[in-house]
């Protein structure tokens, strides 16, 4: 059976981020992705002087109620940008209802901020709502800014291995979920740090000094797609690091403008090949 995932993210009508990254990535990895938009934007926000933005909280509530009436069951629930505490509550209730129907894998990307600051629409109340939501997750994928917010720690610009592994363990204790912290700066290099409750995994990678929107969405989508393809946690994290780095490098080489976002299109063939190999091994 093809796994079915409820993908709860915002939708940008121009440039790549959130659902325009999530949907093709999950689909090429053999996952049927069902979008539930949390907001509608004319474009992604980085690099654009103006843009249209509308929260879709009422639409979310009505869609979720329709799904409930139909008795739909999902193999995974995957949330990203949530524009309000009410949306976080809707997602939490949806996760709980899905778990009553079966074994749903839940990945929460706790979108709160980056570069040592909260995103513009966010406030401390939303941080508290996200702290509650991550306790519903099986896996969380914060960046270091989001990890600091969830732990009520000061922002850091450089980490030691001991410090970031301690943060990962604390987030595991706080959420009860596997933890993957992305874009961890270690001076001259960058790494992803993961903790599954027993083993720590540190994966350094050569930083590419560009900042494309959508990289976090791509990373989490690859991670989830590989896990739904029955890959082990460590293998899935390694794959997400490898293919996200590949997409960033190819986007740079292709001359993609920063505001256009990272291009999942440039790695879809590679992901399809990975999915075929994994399917043959199962």
Image (spheres, rainbow, N blue to C red):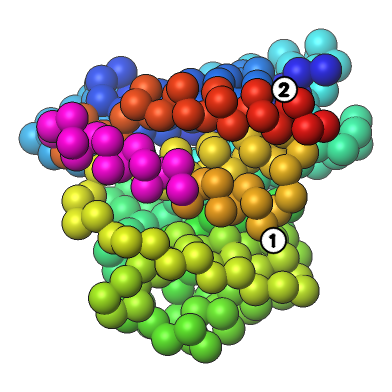
Q: Secondary structure at mark 1?
A: strand
Per the model, the C-alpha gap separating discs 2 and 1 is 21 Å
Task: Determine the image quadrant of residue 31.
Answer: top right
Q: Residue at 82% of width from left, 23% of height from top? A: 73
Residue 72 left/right relative to 193: right
Residue 225, compared with residue 201, is above or below; it is: above
Residue 282 left/right relative to 229: right
Please tell me how crowded label 2 is: few (under 14), some (14-19), or many (20+) other residues with Cα within 10 Å.
many
Q: Position of residue 268 (x, y in %)?
A: 45, 24
* Pointer 2 or 1: first along the chain: 2
Q: Is residue 145 visible?
A: no
Q: Residue at 56% of width from left, 53% of height from top? A: 238
Residue 157, compared with residue 52, is above or below; it is: below
Task: Determine the image quadrant of residue 10.
Answer: top left
Residue for badge 1 = 178
Q: Residue at 63% of width from left, 78% of height from top? A: 170
Q: Which residues are magenta?
A: 242-257
Q: Secondary structure at mark 2?
A: strand
Q: Position of residue 80 (x, y in %)?
A: 51, 41
Q: Position of residue 266 (x, y in %)?
A: 34, 26
Number of marks drawn: 2
Q: Is residue 74 visible?
A: yes
Residue 29 left/right relative to 18: right
Q: Residue at 74% of width from left, 26% of height from top? A: 279
In the rendered image, which quarter contains the N terminus?
top right
In the rendered image, which quarter contains the C terminus?
top right
Please tell me how crowded label 1 is: few (under 14), some (14-19), or many (20+) other residues with Cα within 10 Å.
many
Q: Is residue 255 shown in magenta?
A: yes
Q: Is residue 220 shown in magenta?
A: no
Prevailing secondary structure of the magenta residues = helix
Report the front residue among 90 and 10: 10
Residue for badge 2 = 4
């Amino acid at each position: 059976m093809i796994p079915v995932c409820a993908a709860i993210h915002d939708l940008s009508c121009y440039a790549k981020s959130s659902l325009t990254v999530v949907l093709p990535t999950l689909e090429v990895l053999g996952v049927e992705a069902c979008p539930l938009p949390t907001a509608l934007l004319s474009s992604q926000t980085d690099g654009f002087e103006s843009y249209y933005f509308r929260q879709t909280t009422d639409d979310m509530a009505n869609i979720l109620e329709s799904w409930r009436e139909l008795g739909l069951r999902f193999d995974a629930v995957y949330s990203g940008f949530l524009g309000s505490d009410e949306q976080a509550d809707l997602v939490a209730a949806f996760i709980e209802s899905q778990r009553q129907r079966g074994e749903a894998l839940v990945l929460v990307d706790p979108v709160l901020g980056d570069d040592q600051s909260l995103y513009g629409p966010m406030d401390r109340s939303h941080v508290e709502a996200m702290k509650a939501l991550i306790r519903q997750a099986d896996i969380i994928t914060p960046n270091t800014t989001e990890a600091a917010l969830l732990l009520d720690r000061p922002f850091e610009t450089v980490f030691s291995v001991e410090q970031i592994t301690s943060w990962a363990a604390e987030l595991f204790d706080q959420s009860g979920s596997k933890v993957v912290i992305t874009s961890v700066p270690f001076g001259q290099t960058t790494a992803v740090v993961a903790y599954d409750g027993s083993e720590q995994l540190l994966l350094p990678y050569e930083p590419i000094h560009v900042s494309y929107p959508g990289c976090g969405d791509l990373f989490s989508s690859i991670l989830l797609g590989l896990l739904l393809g029955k890959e082990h946690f460590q293998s899935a994290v390694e794959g997400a690091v490898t293919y996200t780095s590949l997409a960033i490098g190819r986007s740079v080489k292709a001359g993609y403008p920063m505001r256009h976002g990272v291009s999942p299109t440039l790695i879809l063939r590679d992901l399809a090949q990975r999915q075929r190999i994994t399917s043959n091994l199962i």
